[in-house]
Image (tube, helix red, strand yellow):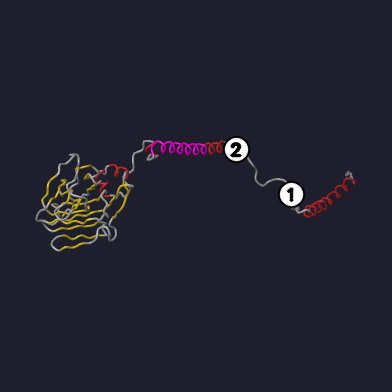
Amino acid sequence: MAVDNPQSSSSYSASSATHPADMQARARKREAIGLAPDRETAPDAYLRPPDDSSHAAQWLLVCCVALLGLAVVLLLVARFLNPDSTLAGLFGLPPTVEQEAAAVTPDSARSATQPVFAALPGYQLWLADDFVAPSQLAPEQATPGQVSAAVIAGAGVYRMQVSPNQMGWTLFDLADANSYRLETSATVNADTPSGAAGLLARFAGAGNFYQLTIDGAGAAAVQLWLDGQPYPLPALSAAVTPNPVGQANRLAVEDDGARLRFYVNQTVLAEVLDPQLPAGRPGISTTAAGSIPASVDFDWIAIYRPQP
């Protein structure tokens, strides 16, 4: 026999009928104060505690940061001790191809072909030209049967060509300055190996000057010319090793008013105390001593004067 409980059934029905109404009233109250009608009671995604894989990733990040810090510290210390240090040098790694090529380049060849227009100790740069455009310092000249000279802008050189048994020169006006240093880079053309490149100092007219020459065989000499006759001057050092034909040589002459010094590839070749000739203009020269013409390319010119 089934026994009904009218009270229980009635209570359940009333509760079921009032629950949606309570939810709607609660929703209206939430909306009245600017909240969403319903409130989420649980997130869709669950947070999980870290496992072993996440620990490994964290340690990897720590190691990367530590290595980066170590590299920065090493570079700072190396820069303090040696400004040219690199990471490759610190860790003993082999040099790059460019570093190896630079390491085997002779200093004389590199210094001769690269213009160095920085002020020298006791001097300041006054006039300079690297011949990439028409030059005011070394103008064009042409004397048939004797000499022709002009800037070859495409090659970046001042090319001087002279006829057989001739000497040509280009002089520089130093505005009555008695103290100076003149430098240039000169290459005897491979087609004229008997020619010679040179510098002039204390030019007092045709046949009266001091001259430094480097011929195609790589022989260096300093001469005093008086009335058209050359007088060789002794060399101070046998360690001067000029480059032969087709290779550049860095030539320099220094005149302080009381002494002349001639340099080849930054080594003193000869010194003249109490020069016989008075103060005069310096210059560059090309000589064809035999029956074959001579051609010389001058890569750059730099003239310095003493600092005040």
Picture coordinates of residue 96 (x, y %)? 34, 43
Give the SS element for disc 1: loop
> Looking at the picture, how far across and down is residue 92, in whole percent?
36, 36
Residue 50: image tag: 2
Q: Give the main secondary structure of the magenta stretch.
A: helix
The label number, if any, that marks residue 39 in the structure image: 1
Specify start and end residues of the magenta stretch as a single range: 60-82
Q: Hey, what amino acid is under mark 2? A: Pro
Give the image location of residue 231, x and y in percent: 12, 47
Q: In this orientation, which residue lies closer to the viewer: 94 or 157?
A: 157
Examine the image and state in which quarter residue 133 appears: bottom left
Mark nearer the N terminus (2 vs 1): 1
> Around disc 1, counting alpha carbons within 10 Å, would you say few (fewer than 14), some (14 to 19), or many (20 or more)?
few
* Residue nearest the observer in this picture, 99 or 269: 269
- Is residue 73 covered in magenta? yes
Graded by Cα atoms within 10 Å as few (under 14), some (14 to 19) or many (20 or more), the crowding at tag 2 reads few
Q: Residue at x 80, y 53 (%)?
A: 29
